[in-house]
């Protein structure tokens, strides 16, 4: 059982096999026309990602431009209310306001080394789109972002920010007009332009090597949090908590603690308004394995294998799939996955605002609600929570709900 402050050794846990599988999950299920682009990316990931010059440039950009390391903040107000010791890993303080910048910077640097001429991306809550647009502006690469029309309406500030950074934002009206539809359109673009286009996928989903690549770029969250907590408090957390949609902020936090058996790892999915299809986005709690967006993982589907529509008050969790590594961790029992409702998330968001002077993203509010429940189960627990993003982007949505009163 590991208790030191050192980073995971080169023999890392959770490595996919040669077929890109995490246990039975993962792989790549893509049109034949994309296989050369996938192979080119996989070769680049294998060669470039561990190289000294890439690592040094990435660390420099994250430090000098993205604002890492982010703070680890004790939340005494929440701690008093919940009867726990609550620590927040402040990804909301990273440049552009969420953990998404870690992945965007790394993939843009990789794309430039692979001589890509343009970047295409998808976004739900808009944070991945904003991060990608900002990173592309810095790198001098043109950027196209696909976004569901439903999400465009509820995330207008992020749409404006993407356009300010020079990105072309394309509304997607097909399907459910949310994140799933945006990924579909981004992948269609890539199929039509496989040679010069780099698809900058925003979460630990999609065909191999994306789940591994995004995991590696987001694992900075857990490395920093582990080191900071040991330095400040002298001990690891009892529980580490993060919200799970596609799952990148959660895997970024959890990966560094997988070997620490004393640390309970808990992912929080969107329970929405109910348990019926179309009322939630609880993929790991209520889904079953299948293929979506290029990989085999848990997803929400009907008896005929048709992907179901989802609901969450948070656009970033409104997705019917999940990363394959999360599916493996669910099945082997290392990570627990729970659900919280829209109402619970909104109440936890209000408590965080009033107790800590921090406005979390609606996605992060699900992790807060989950932590509150876990604190009730284990009074006095030391809880480490990934505050994945800030809530400025959600103000329009929040002000329409109960006139901004989230106390009930």
Image (cartoon, helix red, strand yellow):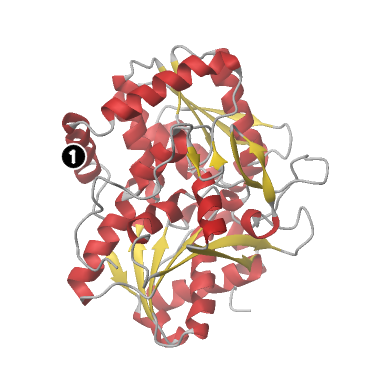
Above-or-below relation of 408 to 158: below
Q: Position of residue 337 (x, y in %)?
A: 56, 63
Instruction: Tally the marks.
Output: 1
Q: Which residue is rendered at x = 40% and y = 58% of the image?
A: 254
Left or right: 248 with respect to 228? right
Residue 129 seen in the current view: no
Q: Vertically, is 382 above or below 346?
A: below
Quadrant in the picture for residue 134 = top left
Residue 232 in sight in this render: yes
Q: In this view, does 407 lie to the left or right of 235?
A: right
Position of 151 compared to 6: left or right?
right
User: Who is closer to the viewer here, 127 or 216?
Assistant: 216
Q: Which residue is drawn at 64% across and 53% down?
A: 283
Is residue 24 found left or right of 163 in the rendered image? Answer: right
Q: Residue furthest right?
A: 304
Residue 153 lies, in percent from the top left, at 63, 43
Taking depth in this image into account, of 11 and 65 the one nearest to the observer is 11
Quarter of the figure with residue 137 = top left
* In the depicted structure, whether residue 138 falls above or below residue 154: above
Residue located at (48% from left, 15% from top): 36
**Above or below — where is 5 with respect to 123?**
below
Quarter of the figure with the C terminus: bottom right
The N terminus - image quarter: bottom left
Q: Foreground residue, 405 or 279?
A: 279
- Residue at image mark 1: 60
Secondary element at tag 1: helix
Query: Mark 1 Cα within 10 Å, few/some/many (few <14, many 20+)?
Result: some
Could you say where residue 247 lies in the image, as x and y percent from the top left?
A: 50, 50
Measuring from the top left, give residue 55's x and y in whole percent: 21, 36
Residue 330 falls in image quadrant: bottom right
């Amino acid at each position: 059982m590991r208790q030191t402050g050192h980073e995971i050794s080169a023999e890392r846990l959770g490595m996919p096999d040669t077929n890109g599988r995490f246990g039975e999950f993962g792989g790549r299920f893509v049109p034949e026309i994309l296989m050369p682009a996938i192979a080119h990316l996989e070769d680049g990931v294998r060669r470039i990602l561990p190289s000294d010059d890439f690592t040094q440039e990435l660390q420099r950009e994250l430090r000098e431009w993205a604002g890492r390391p982010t703070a680890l903040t004790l939340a005494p107000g929440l701690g008093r209310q919940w009867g726990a010791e609550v620590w927040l890993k402040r990804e909301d303080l990273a440049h552009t306001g969420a953990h998404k910048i870690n992945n965007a910077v790394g993939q843009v640097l990789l794309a430039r080394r692979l001589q890509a001429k343009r970047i295409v991306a998808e976004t739900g809550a808009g944070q991945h789109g904003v991060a990608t647009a900002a990173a592309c502006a810095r790198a001098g690469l043109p950027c196209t972002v696909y976004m569901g029309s439903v999400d465009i309406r509820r995330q207008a500030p992020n749409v404006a920010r993407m356009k300010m950074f020079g990105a072309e934002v394309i509304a997607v009206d097909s399907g459910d007009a949310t994140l799933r539809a945006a990924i579909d359109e981004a992948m269609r673009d890539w199929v039509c332009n496989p040679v010069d286009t780099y698809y900058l996928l925003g979460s630990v989903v999609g065909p191999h090597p994306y789940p591994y690549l995004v995991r590696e770029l987001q694992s900075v969250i857990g490395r920093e949090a582990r080191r900071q907590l040991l330095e400040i408090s002298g001990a690891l957390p009892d529980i580490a908590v993060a919200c799970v949609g596609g799952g990148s902020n959660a895997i970024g936090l959890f990966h560094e603690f997988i070997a620490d058996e004393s640390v309970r790892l808990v992912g929080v999915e969107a329970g929405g308004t109910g348990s019926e299809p179309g009322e939630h986005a609880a993929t790991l709690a209520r889904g079953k394995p299948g293929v979506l967006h290029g990989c085999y993982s848990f997803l929400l589907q009907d008896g005929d294998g048709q992907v179901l529509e989802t609901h969450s008050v948070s656009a970033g969790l409104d997705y019917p799939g999940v990363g394959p590594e999360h599916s493996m961790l669910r099945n082997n029992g290392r990570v627990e996955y729970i659900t919280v409702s829209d109402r619970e998330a909104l109440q936890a968001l209000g408590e965080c605002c009033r107790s800590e002077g921090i406005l979390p993203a609606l996605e992060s509010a699900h992790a807060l609600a989950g932590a509150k429940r876990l604190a009730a189960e284990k009074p006095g627990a030391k809880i480490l929570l990934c505050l994945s993003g800030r809530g400025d982007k959600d103000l329009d949505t929040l002000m329409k709900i109960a006139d901004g009163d989230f106390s009930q």
